[in-house]
């Protein structure tokens, strides 16, 4: 298995706007409502089980959270389960 890739905020915005990624915002709904990327889905504190239920293993995924901890942890689990994952390594504001 590979590793997930970390991208900066600007690259993440470009990726989200392309429409080629499933974009997951792991922050609380209040932060999502204030500052989310285009095409992002709000899934606060999502787990690998929730991701699996979406049945989108073949998609490219882009994750982000407030500080990177949640998105990096989930991205690691997803990669181990065969997903192609990117994570934004800085806050979205």
Image (spheres, helix red, strand yellow):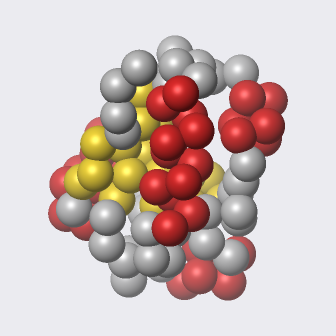
Residue 79: x %, y % from top left: 48, 30
Residue 11: x %, y % from top left: 20, 54
Q: Is residue 87 visible?
A: yes
Q: Nearer the viewer, residue 73 or 83?
A: 73
Q: Residue furthest top?
A: 58
Q: Quick check: 88 left or right of 75?
A: left
Count of all numbered marks drawn on residues in the image:
0
> Is 25 rendered above or below residue 50?
below
Question: Quarter-wise, where is residue 84 in the image?
Answer: top left
Q: Quadrant of the C terminus?
A: bottom left
Q: Which residue is at a point 50% across and 42% down the rendered structure image?
A: 76
Q: Which residue is at a point 24% across and 54% down the rendered structure image?
A: 7
Q: Nearer the viewer, residue 75 or 11?
A: 75
Q: Quadrant of the N terminus?
A: top left
Residue 33: x %, y % from top left: 61, 78
Q: Quick check: 58 left or right of 92?
A: right
Q: Is residue 21 visible?
A: no
Q: Nearer the viewer, residue 14 or 9?
A: 9
Q: Which residue is at a point 58% across and 49% down the rendered structure image?
A: 74
Question: Quarter-wise, where is residue 26 in the image?
Answer: bottom right
> Is 23 rendered above or below residue 13?
above
> Is 81 rendered above or below residue 17?
above
Residue 13: x %, y % from top left: 29, 58
Q: Which residue is at a point 71% across and 40% down the rendered structure image?
A: 48
Q: Nearer the viewer, residue 1 or 37?
A: 1
């Amino acid at each position: 298995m590979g590793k997930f890739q970390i991208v900066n905020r600007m690259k993440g915005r470009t990726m989200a706007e392309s429409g080629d990624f499933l974009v997951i915002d792991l922050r609380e709904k209040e932060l999502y409502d204030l500052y989310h990327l285009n095409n992002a889905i709000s899934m606060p504190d999502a787990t690998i089980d929730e991701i699996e239920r979406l049945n989108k293993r073949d998609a490219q995924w882009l994750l982000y959270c407030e500080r990177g901890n949640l998105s990096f942890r989930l991205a690691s689990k997803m990669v181990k389960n065969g997903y192609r994952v990117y994570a934004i390594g800085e806050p979205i504001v």
